[in-house]
Image (spheres, rainbow, N blue to C red):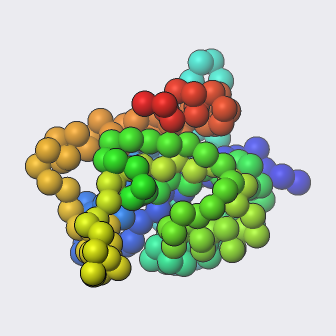
Amino acid sequence: MASDFWLIVGLGNPGKKYEDTRHNMGFMTADVLAERWSVAFSDHKGLAMLGKGAMSLNGRTVKFFLAKPLTYMNDSGNAVASISAYYQIQPDRIVVIHDDMDLEFGRIKVKAGGSAGGHNGIKSIDRSLGTPQYARVRMGVGHAKRGANAHDNTVNWVLGGFGPDQRKQLPEFLMDGADASEDIIFNGLAKTQEKFNGR
């Protein structure tokens, strides 16, 4: 019996060291949703912080789980697969929110399926679910400098914090990410893409 719940997953790394870093855009957006819909998190098998809530928009109410994997980014799939199996949530009812270096800071793109674009969290989820066919809210964090130490630069970039300008824009950006997640659930992927992808 497939569940009528949706699962929204914000990707990030647990622990103080990673708080407020670019790689934790998913966690931060999940926190906005948690606040918005009064979701309280508790531990799911040591794999994720998981909460349950209901969102009501346009006269409809949808039940959802909200997850922040504790597995570290590269093993995010273990948490997502465990929750989706346990609650029988199909991939077409899963929305994953993650940072994306191919988009400038402040831009959001919404998609389902397709390549992981080098994002280890997404690669892990593709593997664990056995399909890339779930919705993604890609939150732009911009790109590190290319060049000789490209890999190290990239790691330091995604695990780095935001400059003062970006920090000012962050609350609104996170709210947009939360809006995009809700739109996918209530209005479907195509309409949400029209709204966000062209910005």
Q: For residue 125, which quarter of the picture?
A: bottom right
Residue lying farthest to the top in this orientation: 59
**Does 2 sit above or below residue 109?**
below
**Does 193 sit above or below residue 90?**
above
Q: Nearer the viewer, residue 189 or 93?
A: 189
Left or right placement of residue 161 versus residue 40 in this view: left
Left or right placement of residue 169 versus residue 3 in this view: left
Spot occupied by residue 60 in the image (x, y as percentages of width and height): 65, 24
Instruction: Tell me, yes or no, if residue 26 can be seen here.
Output: no
* Residue shown at 75% from the left, 64% from the top: 131
* Residue shown at 18% from the left, 47% from the top: 167
Of the 4 image quadrants, the one containing the C terminus is: top left
* Residue shown at 58% from the left, 64% from the top: 116
Q: For residue 193, which quarter of the picture?
A: top right
Task: Tell how many labels.
Answer: 0
Q: For residue 177, which quarter of the picture?
A: top left
**Does 89 sit above or below residue 38?**
below
Q: Nearer the viewer, residue 47 or 96?
A: 96
Left or right placement of residue 195 versus residue 107 in this view: right
* Residue shown at 60% from the left, 74% from the top: 124
